[in-house]
Image: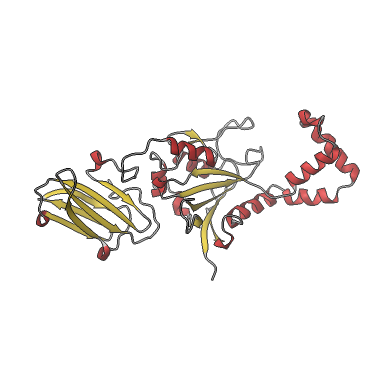
Amino acid sequence: MPQTFQYVLIPADSSVPVELKIGDMSGGLTNDELVQSAKDYFFVQNGGAAKAHAWKQATPDQRKAVANEWRKHNEKASDTMTDDQIANYIQSSQGSPSCEIMALTVPTKGNMYHAVSMYVSDDHHSNDSKKNERASQLLMDCGHRLPETESRKEAGVYGDIFAGRCYDNEMDENEGWKRLDFTPQDLESNSDWIQIAKQARGGGGSGGSNVASLSGMMKKQMDVTAPTQPDNDNNNEESLGYKWDQTDDGVEMWFRLAADVKARQVQIKFQRSRLTVKVADETLVEGETGGGVIVDECTYTLQDDTNNQRELCIVLTKSEEGRVWAQAVRK
């Protein structure tokens, strides 16, 4: 059985439900089924297939007429391109599927190298297309400013769009890139991945930037000053009372305690989606975890640290391997 992944089609017409799509992972990055499906969809939707067929059937005189018409709208290139060059250009631009990619999040350590992108028609700003309210909202939820064009009075994303997720980590020698599921539930503004995208180095637009190319967003994320280890964008020890970090299969939390704290004073209650931490009758944490946990596999240790204090380390095993938690314990 081939491995599959899920992605979505978001119609511009808000009355039409979001459609869940199933893709085959066997193509990998070089022959990604999501990208090819989006290109083929827009190629047919925009009349590209019909145009390509008509161009192949055109006579020499008809092609020359098209070239002359093209020159009227492209005066700068008209003096340097022959009829044949213009014909080849038109054939290549109209005769093959293509799409535009908008990076909602780029892969960073803060989001465990999970990137989410939208795939849009090349001419999504044409006068015939309708504003996609759901896609535009998704762009803003991730911290981006809506794109503007001269042809539109209202900024936004226009036309039907596809959205999908991938794991992209060039430092991973075993599996540097692969498709991950992206479902209609991921479009909710309170989704964990969107909350992470809004954080520093979470991979999103970081507060109202224009939606950018993948390379430009990556550079912006790298330029942000890194916090102290362990590396996590929620890792504000002053406000949380602890540090935390996560991997695909688990979450670790570190608490600094007084040097005289004894093991018998530590009380920890693990539940499937809840954690309670008490030390010497003081409640340090009590609340819903960022995701489900496997209770029998959760552990903790108490040991001396290098600052004349004691350190409590808690390990939570995720029940959904690969899911990125926005928080260790929800506020």
Give the residue furthest to the front.
306
**Residue at the spot 88% in from the left edge and 43% down from the top edge:** 62
Q: Give left or right: position of 68 versus 222.
A: right
Please tell me which residue lies in front, 67 or 254: 254
**Residue at the spot 54% in from the left edge and 46% down from the top edge:** 118
Q: Give left or right: position of 293 versus 303.
A: right
**Residue at the spot 11% in from the left edge and 46% down from the top edge:** 259
Vertical placement of residue 273 versus 100, above or below:
below
- Can residue 188 be seen at all in this image of the molecule? yes
- Can residue 13 be seen at all in this image of the molecule? no
Please tell me which residue lies in front, 146 or 97: 97
**Residue at the spot 52% in from the left edge and 65% down from the top edge:** 3
Please tell me which residue lies in front, 267 or 224: 224
Question: Tag count in the figure?
Answer: 0
Where the C terminus falls, by quadrant?
top left
Residue 289 in the image, given as x and y percentages of width and height: 28, 53
Q: Give left or right: position of 315 versus 106.
A: left
Residue 146 in the image, given as x and y percentages of width and height: 52, 35
Residue 46 in the image, given as x and y percentages of width and height: 69, 47
Q: Give left or right: position of 75 versus 320.
A: right
Residue 119 in the image, given as x and y percentages of width and height: 58, 47
